[in-house]
Image: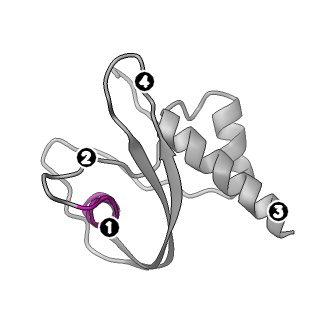
Amino acid sequence: MGRETLEAVSGGIDDGEEPLDAARRELKEELGITAEEWTALGSVDPFTSMICSPTRLFLARRLTFGEVRREGTETMRRVTMPIGEAVEAVMDGRVTHAPSCVVILKLSDASRKRR
């Protein structure tokens, strides 16, 4: 991208790996987090005109924070914010990573429906 981006944890699925297992692995590698509870939130197709790249979305809950195990090329830091602020970040262009935008908006809609 040539610039810093603000996005949810994401990554590729290894050969033979299930999407949920990939999500668990990426969360642990990138942020050192493990989760006891996972909820599937569907999928998004960010590149329909270019390549087949379905992206599965998950919500991780009941988190435990531990040691980070990033790949050598990854530089990142954890950012936390309330869901309302995350929606604002999508709407004002601070978050532009398409799967991150979708998952933030899905979670915002779900939290509104619970009230």
Magenta range: 18-31
Q: Is residue 23 magenta?
A: yes
Of pointers 2 and 1, the one earlier in the residue sequence: 2
- Residue 72 in percent (x, y) is at 12, 47
Q: Which residue is mark 4?
A: 48
- Marks 4/1 in contact by CB < 8 Å: the verdict is no
Query: Which three-letter amino acid code belongs to the residue tagged 3?
Result: Lys
Distance from disc 2 to disc 4, alpha carbons, whole Å, reads: 17 Å
Label 3 Cα neighbours within 10 Å, binned few <14 / some 14-19 / many ≥20: few
Distance from disc 3 to disc 1, alpha carbons, whole Å, reads: 27 Å
Q: Is 89 situated left or right of 42 in this image?
A: right
Q: Which residue is mark 1?
A: 24
Q: Which residue is mark 2?
A: 12
Q: Is residue 28 magenta?
A: yes
- Residue 37 in percent (x, y) is at 48, 79
Of pointers 4 and 3, the one earlier in the residue sequence: 4
Magenta: main secondary structure equals helix
Q: Which residue is mark 3?
A: 113
At x 44%, y 34%, the residue is 5
